[in-house]
Image (spheres, helix red, strand yellow):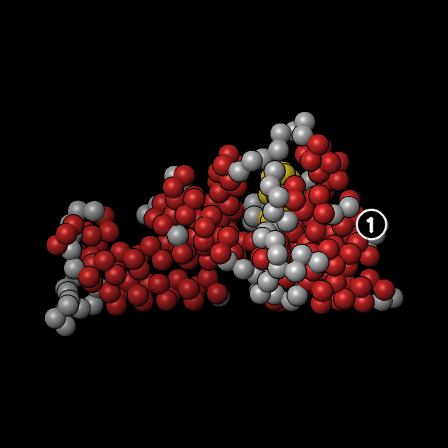
């Protein structure tokens, strides 16, 4: 229903954009707007109505992209980021540690996941809708193995609960990359410039408080399921809270959500509950 509603809004925008000209008169069949979208008319003399119609069509294509197509976009973006970030090679000590910890989780809760390390001092980790989870070496330096597994469980939660998918849809709609959608509504191959712009939108998007809480709960359940140390979720958040806003990465990313100290308290209470 949500997808249908968004599509209906975009279609309404498209139709309303073709309804009148700048002087209030009817635009007729809407051929000029369609020509503008197809690139057969317009240019410097194109009307604002035509531009609005083209923008509305872009939005229509973006909101009707399927979940599977968005996962394809996510994979394209992740491959781009793996090329442009300082990804640790397989023989790197950070990569070897992460591989050891996640070996049993590449197929987790019905999902196919992949894990890599970005060599950066940022205290950060993130996940994209295709199941790619990236951990920064700055976070690994701060966390012991159990705490790191707790953070990884949290990130897996964002994938499983489709928070990452929702964030990608929002970023895709807001970026120029949506123009790569085909006339049939499918997703084409995005250029690096489009993927870079998409990444900026994705980085600036933030999960809601309820999403972060749900991912925390998933992470704790993940720790219990695999018989890891559940208290590690609390201590991981205590360490993040100790940054006191002085570091970028995860601390800044979570700044608008429940404070790390409060999340640590909640994990403590849930872990000790019978």
Give the labeled residue for mark 1. 228
Residue at far right of view = 274
Q: Position of residue 78 (x, y in %)?
A: 52, 41
Of 26 and 261, which appears nearest the observer?
A: 261
Residue at far bottom of view = 24
Of 182 and 215, which appears nearest the observer?
A: 215
Of 163 and 91, which appears nearest the observer?
A: 91
Q: Count residues near mark 1 (Cα–Cα under 10 Å), then give few for <14, some for 14-19, many for 20+.
A: some
Of 197 and 246, which appears nearest the observer?
A: 246
Residue at 69%, 35% (x, y): give it.
94
Residue 220 lies in quadrant = bottom right
Tell me the quadrant of the picture where the C terminus can be found.
Answer: bottom right
Residue at 28%, 62% (x, y): give it.
14
**Dot 1: element:** loop
- The answer to whether residue 183 shows anywhere in this view is yes
Please determine whether, in this image, residue 16 is positioned above or below residue 76: below
């Amino acid at each position: 229903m949500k997808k249908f509603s968004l599509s209906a809004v975009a279609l309404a925008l498209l139709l309303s954009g073709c309804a009148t000209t700048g002087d209030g008169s009817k635009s007729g069949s809407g051929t000029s707007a369609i020509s503008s979208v197809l690139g057969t008319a317009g240019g410097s003399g194109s009307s604002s109505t035509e531009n609005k119609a083209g923008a509305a069509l872009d939005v229509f294509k973006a909101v009707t992209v399927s979940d599977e197509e968005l996962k394809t976009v996510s994979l394209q973006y992740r491959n781009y980021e793996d090329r442009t970030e300082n990804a640790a090679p397989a023989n790197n000590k950070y990569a070897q540690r992460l591989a050891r910890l996640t070996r049993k989780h590449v197929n987790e809760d019905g999902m196919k996941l992949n894990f890599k390390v970005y060599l950066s001092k940022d205290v950060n980790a993130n996940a994209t809708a295709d199941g790619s989870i990236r951990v920064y070496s700055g976070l690994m330096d701060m966390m012991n193995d159990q705490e790191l597994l707790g953070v990884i469980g949290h990130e897996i939660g964002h994938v499983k609960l489709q928070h990452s998918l929702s964030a990608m849809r929002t970023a895709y709609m807001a970026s120029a990359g949506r123009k790569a959608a085909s006339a049939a509504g499918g997703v084409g191959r995005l250029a690096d410039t489009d993927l870079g712009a998409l990444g900026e939108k994705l980085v600036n998007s933030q999960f809601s408080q309820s999403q972060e809480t749900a991912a925390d709960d998933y992470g704790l359940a993940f720790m219990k399921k695999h018989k890891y140390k559940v208290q590690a979720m609390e201590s991981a958040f205590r360490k993040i809270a100790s940054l006191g806003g002085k570091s970028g990465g995860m601390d800044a990313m979570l700044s608008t959500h429940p404070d790390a100290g409060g999340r640590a308290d909640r994990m403590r209470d849930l872990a000790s509950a019978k």
